């Protein structure tokens, strides 16, 4: 199926938007840390993000194309679970019958050629707090083998040094490193183009590992498979290396063969910083772009786990299925940074193949550090299920393979100078299978036709009086607020302030209390609009003049402020629910009514 929209990031953004899978950030956002900070909050969510208003820049920044496999599945019109299979199928097809890219006369990336090279005009973000500067993290390098002329694509991180200088990190063994060495032998710099803003077809072509795309093959053809049509290129001005016709920006560059530049630190896919060190030095010679380009960036994390993971999984699956009978699926876990941890699912056909699968998986993808092999009744995408297999089926004495002093990924801090140890776990059940390892199964039921009645979940009923203060009770009864938020007045204001505020009568009872002849209760009643400036004698509220008889203070206030009498047992819960006795006590001799209330409501005098 042709998916031509995948060849153009602008079309991809429109497609995501139409599916509700694009978040547009309209607020002005600073490129330094803030943009990445917002992206990190949205990372892994159902939408990619377009920052439309980048402080000091004309052009927007896009992030998140790969951080959700569900989103990627929608974009590629493929169920999420089928993505590794799809990627693997495209790579296999390219390996046997490649569709070469075509060079076209003109393309959107050539709409504008900048009159001079000034990288500070591009909205290139600084991601993590200790990053050494602005980075291109998603741009695709296209170059040619100086000897054979075969094209190669890859993704490398590039740090901006000044307006026309970059520093690049090239891991050991990359084709770019080999090409640079070949150019150096001739005493020449290596020309390449740096293509910013591309779709997943080209991204996957560029990140296809050397095990899938050997050095003598033009791996740009992998993108053609995803698009269902030949990938389109346009010529450069200064070298024979083409640019991606539908990129947003394309920079014509030279990798200097005899000079380096300090690069780093950079927040890497490992979740650790890649340190500062002398690395490749690049001169930018010319900048082309669209009229309205969108800068694409990738936040190290889920985006890389998924994109590298999908590629790695597809490639390992292809190789394993040739070498190990019964291998059904492979997943590169997020806990393993999409690079370092693989779970392999196998339907065992004879003893020993699970252990063989461990070795074959390490061989198929050298950056891997851990491989866990499980049976085909284990969900490899569910870490708990994999742990279950480890817990119940791994024979820790015989099922663990440790490989020491072996080549790994230099970015991984446990592989200093690309050397470290790897571990494989055979978490499959012994073969032939024995009944004690059989997994329990429960009949799978469809609940659709089953009549099940539920009610909305309500908070548990409060035991009478528990946890409710006098104030809460008064407020609830007067309808002022069902539950006062204690935090509303942290540390400040008296109980009376609080009652007055909640019942909508502002004021300072202290002042009122100072009123000659007026009691606190008078004041509350006046303020809450209950009308009576003097309590009705029938209600007999306790006052500062003597012992109270009959209804409690609460009853009295309730009656006055709500116009109806409280229930017979209407004293505040926990404050004499079964009568008014607890509230009918006289104020202590010499004490004020306020003292009395505070005394009675111990535990909640201040809100
Ligand atoms: C987002 C992203 C960032 C990457 N950054 C680097 C990098 O800085 N240096 C590097 O050598 N490889 C990096 N890689 C991995 C290579 O692009 C990848 O392994 C590619 O297949 C190498 O191409 P090659 O096989 O043609 O050498 C990155 C991959 C992705 C997806």
Image (cartoon, rainbow, N blue to C red):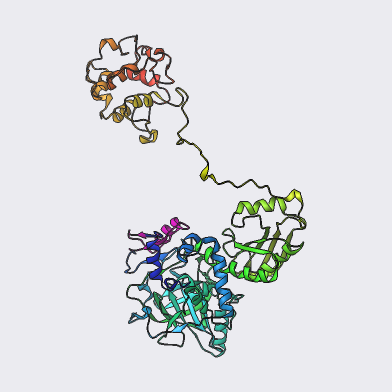
> Measured from the top left, where is residue 134 in percent x and y?
43, 69
Report which quarter residue 111 is drawn in: bottom left
> Measured from the top left, where is residue 170 in percent x and y?
54, 75
Q: Give the residue at x 64% y 69%.
A: 408
> Measured from the top left, where is residue 211 in percent x and y?
62, 75
The image quadrant in which ligand 1 is located? bottom right
Task: State whether residue 360 appears in this view.
Answer: yes
Q: Looking at the picture, tell me which residue is in the foreground, 1 or 459.
A: 1
> Measured from the top left, where is residue 565 in percent x and y?
31, 17
Please give left or right for residue 343 compared with residue 116 in the image.
right
Please give left or right for residue 471 compared with residue 452 in the image.
left
Q: Give the residue at x 37% y 83%.
A: 106
Please check the rendered image and state whether residue 27 is part of the magenta-colored stretch, yes or no: yes
Q: Quadrant of the C terminus?
A: top left
Task: State whether residue 269 appears in this view.
Answer: no
Q: Looking at the picture, tell me which residue is in the foreground, 218 or 457.
A: 457
259 in relation to 376, above or below: below
Q: Which residues are magenta?
A: 24-52
550 in relation to 109, above or below: above
């Amino acid at each position: 199926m042709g998916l031509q929209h995948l060849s153009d990031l602008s079309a991809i953004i429109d497609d995501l938007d139409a599916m509700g899978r694009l978040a547009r950030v309209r607020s002005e956002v600073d490129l330094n840390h803030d943009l990445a900070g917002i992206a990190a909050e949205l990372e892994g969510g159902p939408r990619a993000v377009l920052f439309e208003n980048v402080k000091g820049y004309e052009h927007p920044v896009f992030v998140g194309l790969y951080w959700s496999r569900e989103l990627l599945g929608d974009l590629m019109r493929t169920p999420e679970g089928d993505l590794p299979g799809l990627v693997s199928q495209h790579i296999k097809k390219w390996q046997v019958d490649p569709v070469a890219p075509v060079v076209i006369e003109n393309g959107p990336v050539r709409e504008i050629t900048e009159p001079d090279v000034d990288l500070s005009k591009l909205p290139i973000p600084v991601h993590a707090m200790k990053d050494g500067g602005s980075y291109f993290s998603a741009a695709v390098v296209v170059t040619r083998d100086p000897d054979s002329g075969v094209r190669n694509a890859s993704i490398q991180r590039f740090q901006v040094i000044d307006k026309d200088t970059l520093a690049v990190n090239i891991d050991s063994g990359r084709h770019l490193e080999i090409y640079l060495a070949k150019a150096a032998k001739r005493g020449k710099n290596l020309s390449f183009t740096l293509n910013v803003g591309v779709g997943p077809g080209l991204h996957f072509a560029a990140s296809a590992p050397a095990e899938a795309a050997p050095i003598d093959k033009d791996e740009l053809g992998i993108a053609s498979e995803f698009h269902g049509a030949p990938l389109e290129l346009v010529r450069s001005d200064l070298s024979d290396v083409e640019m991606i016709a539908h990129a947003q920006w394309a920079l014509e560059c030279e990798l200097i063969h005899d000079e380096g530049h300090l690069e780093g630190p950079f927040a890497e896919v490992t979740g650790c910083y890649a340190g500062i060190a002398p690395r490749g030095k690049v001169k930018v010679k010319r900048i082309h772009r669209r009229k309205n380009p969108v800068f694409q960036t990738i936040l190290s994390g889920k985006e890389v786990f998924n994109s590298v993971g999908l590629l790695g999984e597809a490639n390992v699956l292809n190789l394993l299925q040739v070498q190990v009978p019964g291998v059904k699926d492979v997943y590169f876990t997020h806990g393993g940074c999409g690079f370092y941890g693989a779970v392999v699912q196998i339907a065992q056909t004879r003893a020993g193949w699970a252990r063989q699968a461990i070795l074959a998986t390490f061989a198929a993808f050298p950056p891997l550090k851990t491989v866990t092999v499980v049976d085909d009744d284990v969900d490899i995408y569910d870490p708990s299920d994999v742990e279950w297999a480890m817990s119940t089926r791994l024979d820790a004495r015989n099922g663990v393979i440790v490989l020491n002093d072996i080549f790994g990924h230099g970015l991984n801090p446990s592989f200093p100078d690309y050397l470290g140890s790897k571990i494989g776990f055979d978490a499959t059940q012994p073969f032939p299978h024995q009944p004690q390892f059989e997994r329990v199964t429960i009949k799978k039921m469809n609940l659709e036709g089953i009549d099940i009645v539920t009610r909305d979940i309500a908070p548990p009923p409060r035991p009478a009086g528990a946890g409710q203060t006098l104030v809460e009770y008064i407020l609830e009864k007067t309808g002022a607020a069902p539950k006062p938020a204690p935090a509303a007045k942290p540390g400040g204001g008296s109980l009376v302030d609080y009652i007055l505020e909640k019942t909508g009568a502002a004021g300072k009872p202290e002042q009122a209390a100072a009123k000659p002849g007026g009691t606190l209760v008078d004041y509350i009643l006046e303020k809450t609009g209950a009308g009576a400036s003097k309590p009705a004698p029938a209600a007999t509220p306790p006052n500062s003049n003597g012992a109270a008889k009959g209804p409690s203070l609460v009853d009295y206030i309730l009656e006055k402020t709500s116009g109806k009498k409280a229930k017979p047992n209407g004293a505040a819960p926990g404050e004499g629910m079964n009568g008014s006795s607890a509230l009918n006590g006289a104020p202590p001799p010499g004490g004020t009514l306020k003292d009395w209330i505070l005394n009675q409501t111990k535990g909640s005098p201040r809100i």
